[in-house]
Image (tube, rainbow, N blue to C red):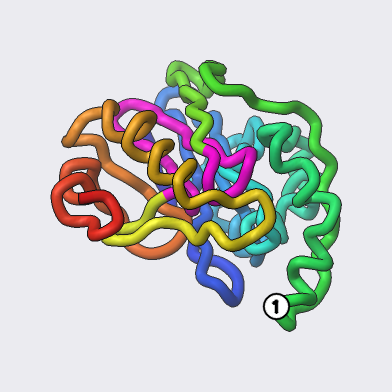
Amino acid sequence: MIIKNVVVGPLDVNCYILGCEDTKMAAIIDPGDNADEIIQAIDNEGLRPEFIINTHAHFDHIGGVKTIQEHFKIEFLLHKGDSFLVENASEQATAFGLSPIPKPDINKFVNDGDKISLGDKIINVIHTPGHSPGGVCYHIDNSVFVGDTMFASSIGRTDLPGGSYETLINSIKERLFPLGDSTIVYPGHGPSTTIESEREHNPFLT
């Protein structure tokens, strides 16, 4: 599997481009900003985007969605629990002193347990609320893309609308830890880590 990381926007969001090596079909996870840079990275890899899948809908993760959606004429998938965040994304951005962002169209909702085909790969959807009500993680092969659910030695903030500290901790321990210690964790900000490292060393989870 091809995994390309493009760090975008003023909050340094990890946008991930996943590509099937055999078919060159691709998925884009959390295109938060810098749409032109993401498009160029996709073109450089010779990939054919099939859809955009977001881990959640905070403004810093969806700022580039609409431009990419229109450029490639592809669908935007999100959990229904975060649809309200799309509606007020510009208000979120301006509250942080940033410019309003173009509102994307949600084409399909993802649900816990869904299996999304990407070429000859399968992406498994895991609902992990806590950072936001509709937060999800995407598990493929031995990798999981967790958005702001968990970071290396930290966790996502829970003081935003719909957030819950207890729910987030439960999501991590009950939904992510069972994936296995060797699973590589790709967070929405910062470096990658592993389930084992976070289970043993993350101060919020030990």
Q: Residue at x 77, y 41 (%)?
A: 83
In the structure shown, which secondary structural element does the residue marked by tag 1 occupy? loop
In the image, is residue 148 above or below residue 77? below
Query: Which residue is the extreme one toward the bottom?
Result: 97
Residue at 37% across, 37% down: 144
Q: Is residue 124 left or right of residue 77?
A: left
* Residue 61 at x, y percent in the picture: 62, 56
Estimate the x, y position of residue 191 in percent, counting from the top left: 32, 61
Inspect the magenta stretch and tell me whether residue 144 lies in it.
Answer: yes
Q: Which image quarter is the N terminus in? A: top left
109 vs 95: above or below: above
- Characterize the local packing of mark 1: few (<14), some (14-19) or many (20 or more) Cα atoms within 10 angstroms: few
Tell me if residue 115 can be seen: yes
Q: Of 183 and 156, which appears nearest the observer?
A: 156
Instruction: Report x, y in % for residue 3.
Output: 40, 44
* Closer-to-camera residue (67/59): 59
Q: Which residue is mark 1?
A: 96
Residue 187 lies left or right of residue 194; in this view the side is right
Question: What residue range appears in magenta?
Answer: 129-149
Q: Residue at x 80, y 37 (%)?
A: 106
Residue reaching furthest front? 166
Q: How many numbered badges does the structure rendering display?
A: 1
Name the spot of residue 7 as percent of width and height, x first: 49, 65
Identity, as a three-letter code, of the amino acid under mark 1:
Phe
On screen, 48 above or below 45?
above
Residue 28 visible to the viewer:
no
Name the one closer to the observer, 177 or 19. 177
